[in-house]
Image (tube, rainbow, N blue to C red):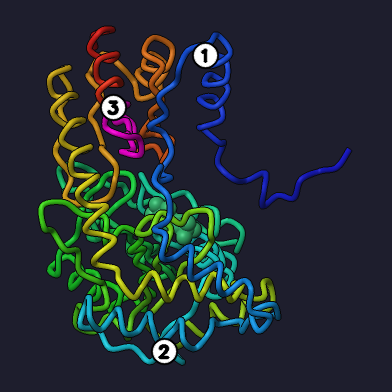
Amino acid sequence: MFQLAERIKQLPPYLFKAIDEKKKEVAAKGVDIIDLGIGDPDLPTPPRIIDAMIQAVRDPANHHYPSYSGMEAFKVAIAKWYEKRFSVTLNPESEVIALIGAKEGIANFSLAFLNPGDYALIPAPGYPVYNSGTHFAGGRPHVLPLYKENDFLPDLDSIPEEVARNATILWLNYPNNPTAAVADRHFFEQVITFANTHDIMVCNDLTYSEITFDGYKPMSFLEAKGAIERGIEFHSLSKTFNMTGWRIGFAVGNSEAIKGLGAIKSNIDSGIFQAIQIAGIEALRAVEESSEAMQKIYTKRRDIMVNGLRECGFTVNPPKATFYLWVAVPDSYSSVDLTARLLEEAGVVVTPGNGFGDPGEGYIRLALTKDEGRLVEAIERIQNIGI
Ligand SMILES: *Cc1c(COP(=O)(O)O)cnc(C)c1O
């Protein structure tokens, strides 16, 4: 009957589908499932953000088409936060754009800057949208494998000259989903040198900048010298403020990059509902306050899981940021085998590392998105089955 377009057919197979099906099977048997598979915070959005939204919804001024690039007040709030948090000065008019979530901007960015056949340099394991956006734009993904021995940073020297010459975009994501790795200034400076040499745009996904542990504060790519000439940074309010369902994020950085993204967006969507942007302004007004509260909660959860998993015999390093644990799978298992066993025998859902790309084989990802009681129970169940 109807044939899907090649751009859909060419997407890599959805590896989580098998897990989803198995999850349903196990749940149908009446097993109480502890789902640590999804990167979606379990806690509610802070009340003051909800209150700001409710007030804004009642105001008829907010019922119209919003501005494509975002309300001025939201963009000014973003620039102010960047100045305060990263000491990066941005022009709210030309260097900031509001997004319907970081995912939307990431997917659309490739449409703005990739010509068919251009390479995009894409880390794996990684957030799948860098790859799907590249496919939709007709670009060629070149995988940058992230290995433990390189601290899960891409090895830029290993990129073939022909690929580097024809590459248009380099995707980065630090703090990293799924490996929880972080990057420092030295790495970003190397990236800028590489990008300058080959005339490549750099896109850093900084979704997890405020989900951190032990006082660690990730830097913005834009803090590195020459970064604003080279690229942009994507942000999301989803993880920082437990707002995954609201759909709000933003991108900041190079004005030509922002303009190109805006050109695609103005043809595809019509901006974010203003009431949500007003709630976003309220969120950005007190980032530190709400993230400190979240950091406390995630720290307790992290410690329960890291200690518990170690007692079960796993090798796991406590992360400095993100709400994920990237756990090495014992030699006797593949990622998928261990995921299946944890689900079938312990009722615990995790994500197989290879679901984020082949170089993720040998790992599973656990999200710290359940309360302490459930995490303790997950550990007990894993202990009981033995690994
Ligand atoms: C969750 C996530 C996103 C998506 O954020 P939204 O603003 O909800 O679209 C983007 N990148 C990474 C790495 C993520 O983990």
Q: How many marks?
A: 3
**Foreground mark, 2 or 3?**
3
* Disc 3 packing (10 Å; few <14; some 14–19; many ≥20): few
Specify the segment rendered in magenta: 361-375
Of the residues shown, which amino acid type is indicated by label 1?
Val
Cα distance between the residues tagged 2 and 1? 50 Å
Q: Which mark is residue 26?
A: 1
* Disc 2 packing (10 Å; few <14; some 14–19; many ≥20): some
Q: From the viewer's perspective, is residue 175 above or below residue 248?
A: above
State yes or no: Cβ of the residue under disc 3 lies below 8 Å from any atom of ligand 1.
Answer: no
Rendered residue at 10%/52% (across/down) = 214
- Which quarter of the figure has residue 75? bottom left
State yes or no: discs 3 and 1 in contact (Cβ < 8 Å).
Answer: no
Cα distance between the residues tagged 2 and 3? 44 Å
In the picture, the quarter occupied by the C terminus is top left
Residue 149 is situated, as x and y percent measured from the top left of the image, at: 15, 43
Q: Which mark is residue 373?
A: 3
Residue 379 is situated, as x and y percent measured from the top left of the image, at: 25, 20
Q: Which mark is residue 92?
A: 2
Rendered residue at 38%/76% (across/down) = 232
